[in-house]
Every structure is written in structure tokens, then in C-alpha cells.
Amino acid sequence: MPGGGIAPDGERWIACRPGCFLPVRVLSRLFRRLFLGQLSAAYLAGQLQFFGNQAALADPKAFKDHVAPLRRSEWVVYAKRPFGGPEAVLAYLSRYTHRVAIANSRLVAFNDSGVTFKWKDYRAKQQRRGKVMTLAVDEFIRRFLIHVLPSGFHHIRHYGLFANGGRAENIARARQLLHVPEPPRQPADTGCADDGEPQSSAYPCPCCGGRMIVIETFERGCTPRHHTTQRIWIDSS
């Protein structure tokens, strides 16, 4: 959250009010619109089922009349500063954005009959939270795959000033308007150890600025002759 934004004319920085963290009313109405929109879409797609006292909502008119008052009522959104500060928030989010669903250290045993792993029961007292669970292999795989994003989704998506389309220009303009100096650049890894002076790479990566190594040059339409034996990891996020 940048705590403000660039004016439409690009000539000044508009800061939020002192002590304002989020516009709660705007956030509540945005959440209301998105929630009810997704609920209606799920109903039209036949993904909702009603039983017991709610069986009458299977009728489209009854469902529409039931949801209509919710679009006019004020929804309550509660937001406050974290107890542990920004560092605690980043540590919490990093567990979901830069780690797998379960660490190897939590796996206790596995065989053809099941997988045994450690987990924490946060409803129990501090001394009794650590527990062990055994699941069938197919059930363990099913739960693991719930944490795998579908194709086309990203762990982290940037919006506003930090959207990929104009992030560099927006951040540079924001620093200029706020009179904040640009942070010093990290020296590129050139692989030279003869002196401590940072050297610019002849082929810098357009994304991270790191050193790229040319392994072969071939003309358009030709098939490369070089086949690397190294495994190359590509982060598509």
C-alpha cells in the first residue's frame, strides 16, 4: 500500500489522510459487489444447492428477492494495523507465496498405505498444538493439489502504481514528486574477482539486470545446434 498516488496530471503526489490505512467504506462496498457478483454467477452456473429451509431459493425469483436487500445494506469490513508490524505481515505472506504447501521437515513417514505428517492444531493450547496425521496416498495428493494454482494464475499480482505495464515509470515519478533519492543499484554478478569495482554486463537480463551468457548465435528459421545439459528453471510468475 503506497499511502497515496500520483495525480491524474502527473504533477503532484496525493497523500492519504494521516492515520488512514484503508478507505473502509470503499473497501466494504467493493467487497460487497464482488461477493454478490460471484454468488450470482455461481447460482446461474448451477453450482449452488439448497436444502431444508432454504430449498425455496432454488427458484430464480426467490433467490433474486432474497439477495436484493443485501445489495442495499452496508457491509462491515474490519481492518487494523498488525500487532507485529510490517515484518510480521511479510513473514506470514511469504509462507504462501514463496514456499510449497508442506515442507519436507513435516513429513514423518510414507508407504503404500498412507502418508504421515506433522500439523498444528491452533484450537488447542500451545503445548498441545503439535500433532501427527496419517492420510491415504490419494487423499494426501488431493489436499496437496488444492494449493497448486490453476494455469494462468499468479501467486502475486500487482495493481495500480506497481502494475507491470508502467511500474518503473510510476515508481520513478513517485520518487521525484516525493523528493526521495533512488536507492543504489546492486552490482551485477560479472564473475570477475580481480577487483571490487562493479562492472556492467555486456548482456544484462532485461528483467533482473543479471549477467546472461551467450551459448550460441543462429539465424532466424535455423535450428540451434547447442543442447545444454543444465536444467533451466523459468519463473513464470
Image (tube, grey):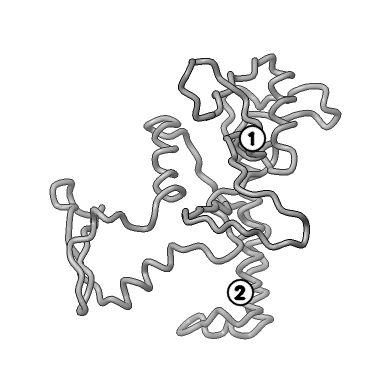
User: Between 76 and 145, which is closer to the camera in this rendering?
Assistant: 145
| Residue plotted at (44% across, 37% down) | 90
Q: Secondary structure at mark 2?
A: helix
Other residues around mark 1 within 10 Å, as few (<14) / some (14–19) / many (≥20): some
User: Between 2 and 200, which is closer to the camera in this rendering?
Assistant: 200
Other residues around mark 2 within 10 Å, as few (<14) / some (14–19) / many (≥20): few
Asked whether, in this view, residue 13 is left or right of residue 110, the answer is right
Asked whether, in this view, residue 166 is left or right of residue 86, the answer is right
| Residue plotted at (69% across, 81% down) | 61
Q: Residue furthest right?
A: 9
Give the label, 1 or 2, closer to the camera.
Answer: 1
Percent across and percent down for residue 55 are: 52, 85
Question: First in sequence: mark 1 or mark 2?
Answer: 2
Query: Quarter-wise, where is residue 159 in the image?
Result: top right
| Residue plotted at (58% across, 35% down) | 211
Query: Quarter-wise, where is residue 42 in the image?
Result: bottom right
Q: Is residue 109 above or below residue 62?
A: above
Report the residue marked by disc 2: 42
Give the residue type that dot 2 points to. Answer: Ala
| Residue plotted at (66% across, 58% down) | 33
Percent across and percent down for residue 132 are: 17, 62
Report the residue marked by disc 1: 204
Where, quadrant-wise, is the N terminus in this rendering?
Answer: top right
Give the residue type that dot 1 points to. Answer: Pro
Q: Is residue 235 above or below residue 22?
A: below
Percent across and percent down for residue 185 are: 59, 22
User: Between 114 and 19, which is closer to the camera in this rendering?
Assistant: 114
User: Between 211 and 4, which is closer to the camera in this rendering?
Assistant: 211
Q: Marks 1 and 2, how far apart in space?
A: 47 Å
> How many numbered dots are placed on residues in this image?
2
Asked if the residues shown at circle 1 and circle 2 are in contact, with their CB atoms under 8 angstroms apart, the answer is no
Asked whether, in this view, residue 230 is left or right of residue 63, the answer is left
